[in-house]
Image: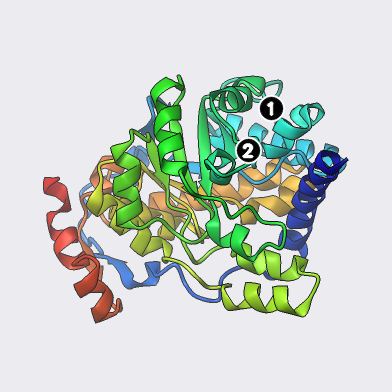
Amino acid sequence: MEAFEGDELTIIRKFEHIEHCLKKQVEAHVSTQFENIHFVHMSLPEIDKDEIDLSVEFLGRRFDYPIMIAGMTGGTKGSQLAGKINKTLAKAAQELNIPMGVGSQRAMIRKPETWESYYVRDVAPDVFLVGNLGAPQFAETMPGRYGIEEALKAVETIQADALAIHLNPLQESVQPEGDTQYKGVLKALAELKGEFPYPIIAKETGAGVSMEVAVRLESIGIDAIDVGGLGGTSWSGVEYYRAKDERSRNLALKFWDWGIPTALSVAEVRYATDLPIIATGGMRDGITMAKAIALGANLAGVALPLLKPAVKGDVEGVVKILLRYIDELKNAMFLVGAKNVDELRKVPLVVTGFTREWLEQRIDLREYLRNRCAR
């Protein structure tokens, strides 16, 4: 009976997450810090705008644009909603030839009958699809901890191409029913990586990845990092709305804006590792995406802005938003004279506004930006 109640709680919680993201203000009150990254306008770009190539390679696949639809949902109560969202997003990803992820598959592992809410191969046979499991489920202190069996099930049941392991200690710590077991996760992921035949992406969910964590993840062979930085959706904010009592609401409110802003997280991970980077967390226009790529990201991921049209099954609406980002990204590339994504990574940048303490104690971002082309 306890297991059944836990399964139902997981499914209901995921439905509530969608509902609050649609109806409430759930974004961070602080910025991504990309406003402190500035392009140098090129009055003589010496390229034709029409010749700009936005294609990019990531984990062995070639995509038409350096944009990813980040994982959002699956396995909700009345899983038709989750299935509708995922299939809508997948159709858009298929049309534009960009990768996409699904939301946490914990519900599917616990209730296998929800697998269809994650399955999109019938509408997106070619899309690069990323499965999703949570890091706490691999912790050595987690009862019934996950291993290779669950990881394979997550990927192969939905015919995914890679697996994201989401790191969400902030959300779990403010969630009354949250899983705060993280002991031994790195070791477990190292063991998983040693026998898992698919790429593994370490994915934060709104609080950013530091250079220290990035180095540890690179050391065990993780294939890519999704920084999931501060500045977009705050999952502590989402949990604030779910809280049932004043004590829980206060805790979630206090940590609403906790984390490393996305721009700084991208810089830290690129400075400390050679891993491919997905920049998620507050990607709300193509100029910001261009800045993220120039700063060191390989892809820019977007979620919340696509949720409203996806809930309605509006593929055209999802594509419309993404095409707006693509137009803005391409225009930014034209104005800095970058005819492809590789050249965008090398354009001059001006950095302003970061605190002296961060620059001195973490990394000298200006020095990093001067020298990054030599890496």
Q: For mark 1, what is the residue?
A: 120
Q: Position of residue 217 (x, y in %)?
A: 35, 43
Question: Disc count in the image?
Answer: 2
Kind of residue at disc 1: Val
- Tell me the element at label 2: loop
Q: Nearer the viewer, mark 1 or mark 2?
A: 2
Q: Residue at 63%, 23% (x, y): give it.
A: 153
The answer to whether residue 151 is left or right of residue 33 is: right
In this rendering, is residue 136 above or below 249? Answer: above
The answer to whether residue 70 is left or right of residue 347 is: right
Kind of residue at disc 2: Val
Crowding at dot 1, Cα within 10 Å, few <14 / some 14-19 / many 20+, comes out as: many
CA distance separating discs 1 and 2: 10 Å
The answer to whether residue 80 is left or right of residue 61 is: right
Crowding at dot 2, Cα within 10 Å, few <14 / some 14-19 / many 20+, comes out as: many
Residue 70 sits in quarter: top right
Q: Earlier in the sequence, mark 1 or mark 2?
A: 2
Find out whether the residues at labels 1 and 2 contact each other: C-beta distance under 8 Å.
yes
Q: Residue at 64%, 75% (x, y): give it.
A: 251
Q: For mark 2, what is the residue?
A: 102
Where's the C terminus, which quadrant?
top left
Q: Position of residue 73 (x, y in %)?
A: 69, 44
The answer to whether residue 345 is left or right of residue 148 is: left
Is residue 121 visible from the viewing direction of this image? yes
